[in-house]
Amino acid sequence: MKKAANCPKGKKRGEGDPARSERSPLETRFTRAMRRVLEGIEEAEHKLSRKTVHALRVSIRRSRSVAAGMRQVDPEGDWMELSREGRKLFRRLGALRDLQVMLGWLRALSEHGNPVRAALLKKIRALERAQLKRARRALERFDSKRWRHWAETLSAHLHDLGEGRNELERIARERFAEVTRLHRKALRRESIETWHDLRIAVKRFRYTIENFFPDRYADWGASLGHIQDLLGEVHDLDVLADFLPKAGSPWTPSERRRWLKRIEAERQKRLEEYRSLTGGRGGFWKAVAAGLAKPSP
């Protein structure tokens, strides 16, 4: 983690304003997420465990999701720069996270001594060592001083969004429209690519609501999080299925049938739950659509 860097100069809107005695809820959430990124980096520098990597990526995603919304309503802020700085580390940690999750699924779906499991564990461990080195280099290059500076200065831009609330409402509706479009497409086509695209759309919509519409998130947050988890696990299983042939000679026709049957059973269990939660007149997406049609509290 870099200890020194040139920071943007100039007094930002709202910075040092004596009349601004209390932080808004959005300021508090943003500052907390930004601080947790720095804390997560310090922890990751000691140990890049699956739990540490996941928590750090979540904090980066929360920070970047605020920046994604604010870029549309606050051209004065350094939101793009913040997003770019976070993206570099987020992506590098993502490659490591994928391997760590795959290790967990391999163990969960097979017995000790399975030849495919043994071959892939060895292969993944080798890939993990390489990704650990790359992740550590990314941690070293991360500009913590600029990140801390943004946490202090950009939070002032979140105190009173004013007419920017209307633009954020539009963004939320636009992102939900993408969710519903991909939801219908996924149910029609059942393709791996469409389920993956839907997972990303749900994630973007969830963080938009969490960051900018806390009253709505209080009603929808648990269901959005659960849906994101279901689709995330489907994606993890798809990644594993694509990786299995790399086991080499242990990947026999019988092993192929055994593994793919187990993976498909786990996939369908999660997809059926997703359909149950979101389908029909009383489905979750219908409730969200009705809520978005009303003015934000």
Image (cartoon, helix red, strand yellow):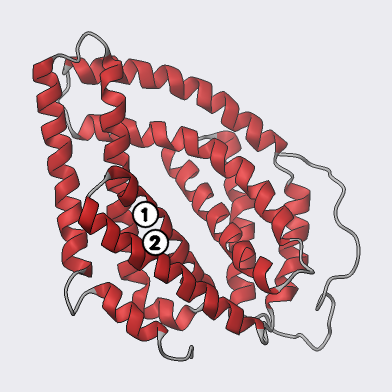
Q: Residue at x 69, y 47 (%)?
A: 85
Mark 1: few/some/many CA within 10 Å (<14, 14-19, 20+):
many
Q: Which element carries disc 2, helix, strand or loop?
A: helix
Q: Is residue 12 visible?
A: yes
* Residue 258 % position (x, y): 10, 26
**Which residue sits at x=11%, y=34%?**
261
- Relative placement, left or right, of 181 versus 186 is right
> Circle 1 is placed at which residue position?
199
**Image: 290 above or below 243:** below
The residue at the point 29 percent across, 43 percent down is: 192
Quadrant in the picture for the N terminus: top right
From the top left corner, tell me how far across and down residue 14 is, in percent.
80, 78
- Badge 1 amino acid: Arg
Q: Quadrant of residue 183?
A: bottom left
Work out whether residue 297 or residue 184 is closer to the camera in this orientation and state it. Answer: 184
Residue under label 2, please give it.
202
Q: What element carries label 1?
A: helix
Is there CB contact under 8 Å for labels 1 and 2?
A: yes
Location of residue 111 with respect to 157 vertically, above or below: above
Q: In this view, does 4 lie to the left or right of 121?
A: right
- Amino acid type of the residue that numbered disc 2 sits on in the rendered structure: Val
x%, y% of residue 268?
A: 15, 48
Vertical order, 53 against 102 (above or below) = below
In the picture as drawn, the residue positioned furthest to the top comes out as: 249
In the displayed structure, 84 sits above or below 109; it is below
Front-most of residues 55 and 265: 265
In the picture, residue 227 is in which quadrant?
bottom left
Residue 49 can be seen, yes or no:
no
Residue under the image location 66 percent in, 70 percent down: 72
Q: Is residue 81 left or right of residue 13?
A: left
